[in-house]
Amino acid sequence: MNLPPPHWPPRGWNSFDSFGAVADERAILDNLDVLVERLLPHGYDTHVLDIGWYRRYHREPGQRFPQVSEATLLGHELDDFGRYLPCPTMFPNGIKPLADACHERGVHFGIHLMRGIPRVAVERDLPISGAEGLRASDIADTSDVCPWCDDNFGVDMRRPGAQAYYDSVFRLLAEWGVDYVKVDDIVPYPREIRAVADAIARCGRPMRLSLSPGDLTCVAHLPDYRRANALRVTADVWDRRNDLAKGL
């Protein structure tokens, strides 16, 4: 289906605001119904699955949404090339049917990624698709870990195979039908911004790129930010009085 051009600036729904890191297939589809009925007529045309879709958590019998903690985290879903896959208990039909459902109703589908390569891929030393003979340990910077989400290591873009890894990730997203990608923990890392932008340019599918978080911007990196479609300019703004000043 040929979708109409997305509204710009982007308007839509993001799963983190309601479900944190534990949105499931049903939550995405139920909220798609609401988006289409109530918000799409007003230009809200992007439906985003945020962080955590690749994590497996312990759930008690009958418990739909797991508790998020190190104690309940059972691991991460990966393919044979170190790329994240959706948790099968939360997304039993995968990601592509979610994107298809959005497209059938005139909505663009978005997904969240953390910068870098999964730590588990490095621990298993998985091969890199499109980089014969190279493996995850060849491109990972194990000293580079996001302070608030340790799922990934950074990628050292000076190393052979680094761009091939990012290219492979975005080829997979293109196969799923992703239209919009929110890449987190990337604003202070211009080399990886360029890597992601280059990967999108050659993935075979138009994708909008949004850079997060927003409290670490640098004027010197403006040329790199312009490779993306959107850039956050504040840290998280929550519904509390002290956060009101962040938007000023």
Image (cartoon, rainbow, N blue to C red):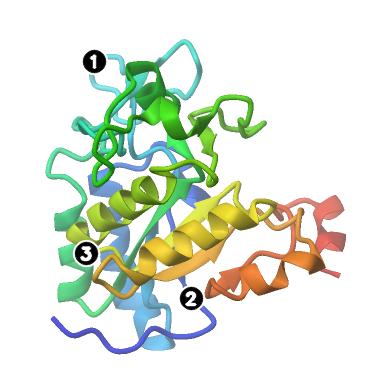
Q: Mark 1 belongs to which amino acid?
A: Pro
Q: Mark 3 belongs to which amino acid?
A: Gly
Sequence order check, earlier mark of 3 and 1: 1
Quarter location, residue 92: top left
Q: Quadrant of the N terminus?
A: bottom left
Q: Mark 2 belongs to which amino acid?
A: Arg
- Marks 2 and 1, Cα distance to the nearest angstrom? 37 Å
How dense is the environment of label 3, judged by Cα within 10 Å: few (below 14), some, or many (20 and up)? many
Label 3 or label 1, whichever lies nearer to me, is 3
Q: Is residue 110 above or below residue 86?
A: below
- Marks 3 and 1, Cα distance to the nearest angstrom? 33 Å
Residue at point 60% right, 46% down? 185
Identify the residue position indicated by label 1 in the image: 61
Identify the residue position indicated by label 2 in the image: 11
Q: Is residue 166 visible?
A: yes
Left or right: residue 45 compared with residue 140: left
Q: Is residue 47 visible?
A: no
Tag 2's secondary structure? loop
Tag 1's secondary structure? loop
Residue 43 position in % (x across, y down): 42, 85
